[in-house]
Image (cartoon, rainbow, N blue to C red):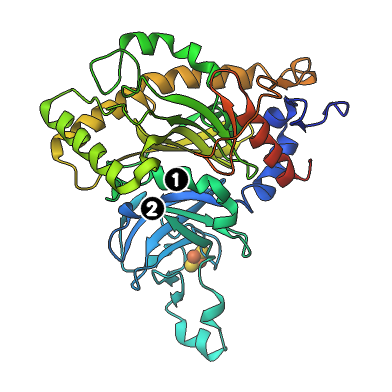
Amino acid sequence: MNAQVKLVDPHAGLVSREVYVSDEIYQKERERVFGKAWLYIGHESQIREPGDFVLSRMGEESVIMTRARTGEVQVMLNSCRHRGMRVCRYDEGHTEKFYCPYHGWAYNLDGSLAHVTEYEREYKQNGFDFAQWGLIKAKVATLGGTVWATWDPNGNFDEYLGPARQLLDLSFVAWDGEGELEVIGSTQKWQIPSNWKIVAENFAGDMLHVVSHRSVDIVGIGPNKESGRRDASHSAQYVQAAYSEGHAAIVGLFDPKDPRRDYSASAITAEYFQDCYAKRKRVLGDQALISPAVGTIFPNMSFHGNQPRTVLVAHPVSVDKTEMWRQYFVDRNAPKEVKDFLRRYYLRYSGPAGLTEQDDMENWNYATNASKGFMARKFPYNYTAGLGNESTTNQLPGATVEVMGQGELHGRKLYGKWAEYMGEA
Ligand code: FES
């Protein structure tokens, strides 16, 4: 490691390449970041009934998200307390209990130990305390159906989000401003040869990289008949919003006269989105004019809150490998034609076959690889764009704001928080 370079200097806008390529740093991240931060686990629509479960991850580790008999959402380490075997090896499903195939311990939906082996009587005679040997449980919080968890017993989700909660409240609600969302299909999962932080920072508000999506913008993969990748939003002023908690996003601030919602693929879709937008304005008032386009909740949960509407979690696998998990959302009560229309749009935009995602992955993978060499590692990355241009807006209370196209405020805030977690601030 080059001892001359501070790992992160948010005031100068510099980040050492060691942050992306050093295995020593990566090993520390596993506990200091992923052992403490609030992490996105999934969405409640994936586990509607008691006994429904999906596997998720907290950092490198597998966890089970399930709904207990009480209706409560549980997040538990997927590792048997007896000798560590995975107690669940299916991505999703429904069960009465989680049975460990190794020696036969079984756990209830709330993680408590239900049975041990056929020698259970002997265990009991020996004073075995079942209550001490349940699955390891994480602390859980929910917001608009999204499920979050932390290993920190003192973790406070509201404090963790801070004022960035506004962005999630506006994103994880149906288009009409009050209905529910649901995940459509299963989670897409694939691996890329990239450090996880390059993914997280890209979605936190890197608008300078739009140049790499030029071909996608020209062909027009968006939801309406015009070119571009997203919905028609000509009057919006886009700003970069970043928070001292490490979260950041690109947010559209719309003109009240803008009709927006020009989803003219068919009469049904056009009518649905226009009706929703009219209701959204009645339900949310001025908040309906605020549209989070894309952002990252520190450390690794990224979301598109407008169109497309998705979540991407960049799960670390190793210092130079990331497992990408992407989910897509639709309004639960939308007509089937609207859901089908959105599903097709989402898949041509994001995921391993999505055109925009392919552009991004090419950049991240080459950048990680080209930063590994002994010479490359001596020189920091540059996040100086927009330094000194920060301001505020009363539409986004608590956010530091930069006018779009100029800033790398998102990177300075995100890595400033990362340095705090790592003890490098
Ligand atoms: Fe699970 Fe032994 S490892 S019962």
Q: Residue at the location (38% across, 21% down)?
A: 235
Q: Is residue 76 visible?
A: no
Q: Nearer the viewer, residue 180 or 98?
A: 180
Image height check: is 249 above or below 105? above
Q: Residue furthest bottom?
A: 125
Label disc, if present, on residue 168 of the rendered structure: 1
Query: Is 406 displayed left or right of 148 in the figure?
Result: right
Quarter of the rendering containing residue 334 = top left
Q: Position of residue 223 (x, y in %)?
A: 26, 23
Q: Position of residue 173 (x, y in %)?
A: 34, 47
Q: Nearer the viewer, residue 140 or 132?
A: 140
Query: Is 147 displayed left or right of 3 in the figure?
Result: left
Image height check: is 226 above or below 68? above
Query: Is 253 displayed left or right of 424 in the figure?
Result: left
Graded by Cα atoms within 10 Å as few (under 14), some (14 to 19) or many (20 or more), the crowding at tag 2 reads some
Q: Quarter holding the N terminus?
A: top right
Q: Residue at the location (67% across, 29% down)?
A: 20
Q: Which comes before the other along the chain, label 1 or label 2? A: 2
Q: Residue at the location (42% across, 62% down)?
A: 101
Q: Is residue 6 visible?
A: yes
Q: Residue at the location (33% across, 72% down)?
A: 69
User: Which residue does the numbered mark 2 point to in the structure image?
Assistant: 144
Query: Is 380 displayed left or right of 165 in the figure?
Result: right
* Tally of numbered discs: 2
Q: Position of residue 231 (x, y in %)?
A: 31, 24
Image height check: is 15 above or below 330? above
Do residues under tags 1 and 2 come within 8 Å of each other at their CB atoms? yes
Quarter of the rendering containing residue 93 = bottom left
Q: Residue furthest front?
A: 257
Q: Amino acid at mark 1?
A: Leu
Q: Secondary structure at mark 1?
A: helix
